[in-house]
Structure formats: structure tokens, C-alpha cells
Amino acid sequence: MFGSEIEKILITEEEIKEKCKELGAELTKAYASDADKLMVVGLLKGSVPFMAELMKYIELPLQMDFMDVSSYEGTESSGDIRIIKDLDCSVKGLDILLVEDIVDTGRTLSVVKQMLYNKGAQRVKIVSLLDKPDRRVVDIEADYVGFTIPNEFVVGYGLDYNQKYRNLPYIGILKPEIYE
């Protein structure tokens, strides 16, 4: 049965939706005066469910784009950041809200944030569904965080293990025997 590989549900679908409402209201307020310069950029593939839910509650006209970057192989960050899909449009002079599923080591976000500044972004802020500070190896923090979680291997709601489990409607801890 699908989901039987999950040891425990860490964050329910309802909790995620409620947090997206809260974050959406906070972001609406934060960007209200400069909404015309705001671009929401999702990091593929993990951010898609979170970004789709979050955007429902940002009450501003939004531009959006996606980047596909990778640094993971299996359960470990390789530290080698690869750009698979770059932005389709210019970010010069824009305020970028970078949407991420999880801030883990921080390597990917650090590189992407600097890249956006190099492309001319005026400001780059990060909103992440999850934050796992115990795994951080780079000094970077999300500006807006849904949930801070322990150092467990989580899947669901966009997060994967070998491209599977992204479609679970919750965040769950994967049973260790699946990935060990």
C-alpha cells in the first residue's frame, strides 16, 4: 500500500494548509507596497506543491518562474550544484521570493541566491516550507519558514527519495530500511 514506507506523519496536510494561509498573509503584507516588482521563483521539483498552495493566499498580482537546480544523490547533498533549468525571464531590478521545499545544508540556496543577485535582482528573500537547521553547513537562513523539523529523512508534499513520494499530501518520516 502506498505510504506504508512512512514511519510517522510529521506534519499533516491540514497543518500545511493552515501554515500556507499564515505565510500568505505575512507575505501579502511584506510585499504590498512593491507588488509590481515581486517575482516568485520556485525551485523545481520539490517546491511545486508548497508554491501552488502558498500562492493561493498571497493577495497580490504575482509574476512567477522556476529554476531547476540539483545537489542531491539519494539521501545526501553532493555539494555540486547543477543548474538544470534557468529562469525564462530577466530578474533585473525585481524583488525575488525564492520558494523552497526545505532548507537543509543550505548549499543550493546559497548558490541560487547569489546567482539571482548576479543577474540583477534587487532583493532576494527565501520562503521555505521546512527548515532543518541541524544539517546546515552554509550560513543561510530562510526569511519565512513554515516548520522547523528535526534531522530526519522526510518525504511528501514535494520532497522525495529517488523521485518517489513527492505526491504524499503530508510530510512523513521515511522508514530507514527504505534508504539504507
Image (tube, rainbow, N blue to C red):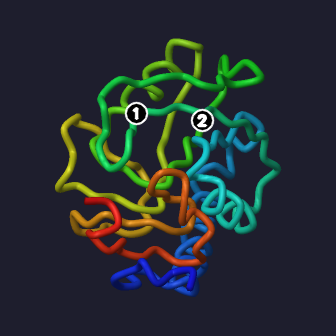
- Identify the residue shown where x is 58% and y is 74%: 168
Label 2 sits on residue: 96
Q: CA distance from mark 2 to mark 1?
A: 21 Å
**Badge 1 density bin: few <14, some 14–19, many ≥20, Cα 10 Å:** some
- Which residue is farthest right? 61
- With respect to residue 178, does 82 lie above or below? above
- Identify the residue shown where x is 67% and y is 43%: 40
Asked which quadrant contains residue 87, the reply is top right
Q: Amino acid at mark 1?
A: Ser
Quadrant for the C terminus, please. Answer: bottom left
The image position of residue 118, as x and y in percent, is 51, 12
Q: Give the number of the mark in front: 2 or 1.
A: 1
The image position of residue 42, as x and y in percent, is 62, 43
The image position of residue 111, as x and y in percent, is 40, 24
Give whichever of 171, 92 is nearer the camera: 171
Asked which quadrant contains residue 76, the reply is top left
Q: Amino acid at mark 2?
A: Ile
Label 1 sits on residue: 71
Task: Using the image, tell me which numbered label, if any, was put on residue 107.
Answer: none
Q: Tell whether 32 sits left or right of 1.
A: right
Of marks 2 and 1, which one's residue comes earlier in the chain?
A: 1
Q: Tell whether 103 sits left or right of 167.
A: left
Quadrant for the N terminus, please. Answer: bottom right
Q: Are marks 2 and 1 in contact (CB under 8 Å)?
A: no
- Identify the residue shown where x is 49% and y is 57%: 160
**Badge 2 density bin: few <14, some 14–19, many ≥20, Cα 10 Å:** many
The image position of residue 103, as x and y in percent, is 36, 50
Q: Tell whether 103 sits left or right of 177.
A: right
> Disc 1 on helix, strand or loop?
strand
- With respect to residue 19, does 36 lie above or below? above
Give whichever of 75, 179 is nearer the camera: 179
Give whichever of 153, 111 is nearer the camera: 153
